[in-house]
Image (spheres, rainbow, N blue to C red):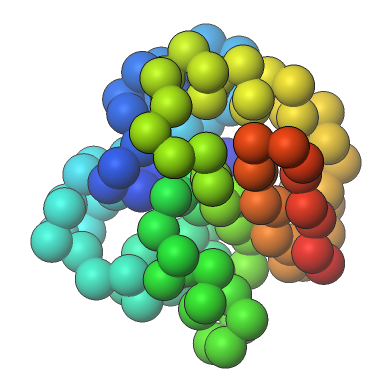
Amino acid sequence: MKFLCDVHISFKIISHLNSLGFETIHVNQILDKWFTKDHDICKYADANNLIIITKDYDFRNSYFINKTPKKLIKINLGNVSNQELITELNSNIKSIQTLDFKSRFMIEIDQDNITVII
């Protein structure tokens, strides 16, 4: 399983996911770094079978309207600490792994629930 973290996701999250054995990169490590446009991030993720992790609603909208990115984790937790986000990801990593075999999915992580859309 491979992840691409959007600009507002901390490098601590990347380090944590890498420590679990998942290939994880940050948008600042690809293409035009933090200047990369959302549609280019989506194309890159889709071409490399990466799951985008983001807090940006534009990716959610693109998932429904443009059918890209194919694999998306949308974080709706507000301004939480890195440790809280790590805890949420750890709690859901097995479910994410089972979905990675699907051709497309979106997971929304909220304070009270997790929503999966295939």
| Point 64% across, 43% down: residue | 110
Q: Nearer the viewer, residue 79 or 28?
A: 79
Instruction: Determine the image quadrant of residue 111.
Output: top right
Instruction: Determine the image quadrant of residue 11.
Output: top left
| Point 41% across, 19% down: residue | 82
Quadrant into which the C terminus falls = bottom right
Q: Nearer the viewer, residue 90 or 111?
A: 111
Instruction: Determine the image quadrant of residue 29.
Output: top left
Q: Is residue 56 above or below residue 110?
A: below
Quadrant into which the N terminus falls = top right
| Point 82% across, 28% down: residue | 94
Q: Is residue 67 above or below residue 99?
A: below
Outermost residue, front side: 112
The image shows residue 12 at horizontal and vertical percentages of: 36, 18
| Point 45% across, 65% down: residue | 57
Q: Is residue 12 above or below residue 9?
A: above
29 to the left or right of 95: left
The image shows residue 60 at horizontal and vertical percentages of: 54, 68
